[in-house]
Amino acid sequence: MEFRDQKHYLFREAVRNGWESAAQFPAALTQGLPSELPKKWLAKFYRTPKIEALSRSTRLVNRFMVGADPEFTLADGIGKLVHANTFKLHVGLAFGADLAGRPVELRPAPSRFALDVLASILTELRWMALTVPKIRECQWFARPYVEHDGIGGHVHFGRKRLDKRDREVNGLDRLASMLTALDVFDRRAVQQRNEDTVYGKFGDVRDQAHGYEYRTLPTWLSSPWLAYLTLVLSKLAVYDPMLIEKSVPSKGTLRNLLAFYKGLDDDAMIAYAALERFGWPKQDVGDFKSAWGLTYPKDLLPTKVLIPEVIEPTDEDRQQIFNLLVKGTPIPAVVPKPNWGPTTLPEGYYPLAYHSDTTGGPRRRGFGELMAGLAHHENAKVRIETGEGDPLRILHPTGLKIPREFSGTQIKFYPNEEVIIYIGQRFREDANKMVQLKKFLLEHFPVWKFADVKPDSFKEFKTSSRVNLRGKEVMI
């Protein structure tokens, strides 16, 4: 197509500089073009796409997965902070307490499609409201800073290439700076989070087995629109960091970024349509339950169900998010049915997280991922502890074989049937070691994945050659 390369370069520069009219285009970039052509290009560039339905063959520019673990806080009727662990919420499940035990944290299912991540957040919020009914009596706040706590909106990326990491993080830092400077995020609260906590600093990245999590962003849960815009822009910043890392901090820049990719990426297309409908979101400091359709009657009975480590969205969840963003239809207060299994454990078996104190700040980092989706038996409980000392110490009945990857590990065998695993800081900070440890637990301990637990699982374990409960004390 004639002038195709010139058009492509012109609009990349429009993104970087936030140009929103043909009059702003420098003459050097339009030289040789018919005089009316840039205006025609710009009109098409800004044309709102007609989106009739949620496509089943999604167009996405990114091959990497996107995930998140956003946080929010609870307060009583007069605004006093209520800690998440008041409701016995644990780390590592689809929803629970964060490591400090004060904010609530969600763990939505990752996806290449940011709309799916948002739909997973919706269903997890619903299940929390339905399984912990007392929590509905609280106000739910998505504020960046609450009583000396920084409340985060971490975004995860399935990106392992270290040679591209710095540039991607630069792009994310630029995005975080713009969303704050443009008052999409609460600027004053973001500043407090940055100054009074260890969170919110630029370049805050934590390695994960799947890639990395970007931890600079504050919580973005105050509305589905703010959440979706943040996820989509973050995805595009990682996909094409050179387009944003040195861009002009303006709403025109971010609007142009969505317009540039709306013909190639369904997330960008839906977000652009939502921007034209709703305008720019602004972080709401009030109770956000109604924004997510969580307006359940007070007398609704609690739902008893085993909560997994993540909850995948249903087609209904996706459609309701789509209807909100594209058509402006409010999210209804739906009572969902479980779309996972198992939803209960056999008698005598309990989630591993229930027997361990999963909160306690950064000194317990990694606990949630280790215990997520695991169960043990009431007659052979497994407790996980942590601290700053030895890399790994295990108290276990005799008969345990130590794999090579844990060489140098201290092992103590005791004659009781309780297993205690002590994980030190150096070990916890190695994401790959924690993945190996989870596999090790499943192979050698009375621990099972939820889906694998049967009524006779513990009986089979006791009679196997892996363990001898008589016990003696040994140090390796």
Image (cartoon, rainbow, N blue to C red):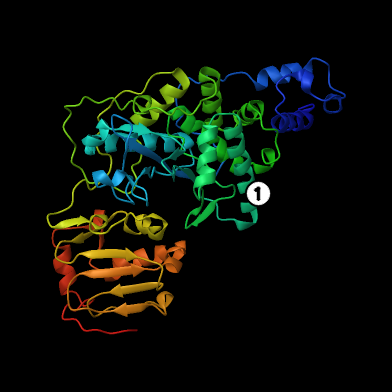
Residue 151 % position (x, y): 44, 42
**Picture quarter with the C terminus:** bottom left
Residue 260 % position (x, y): 65, 29
Q: Residue at x 59, y 47 (%)?
A: 202
Residue 239 % position (x, y): 60, 42
Q: Would you name the residue on which mark 1 appears? A: 167
456 vs 98, left or right, is left
Amino acid at circle 1 = Arg
- Against 312, is 417 above or below? below
259 vs 50, left or right, is right
- Residue at the limit of the structure toward the top, as seen here: 36
**Picture quarter with the N terminus:** top right
Front residue of 92/405: it is 92
Secondary structure state at the residue bearing disc 1: helix
- Against 154, is 29 above or below? above
Residue 447 % position (x, y): 25, 63
90 vs 364, left or right, is left
Q: Residue at x 40, y 71 (%)?
A: 389
204 vs 104, left or right, is right
- Against 1, is 125 above or below? below
Say if residue 65 shows up in the picture.
no
Front residue of 333/45: it is 333
Q: Is disc 1 surrounded by few (<14), some (14 to 19) or many (20+) residues within 10 Å?
A: some
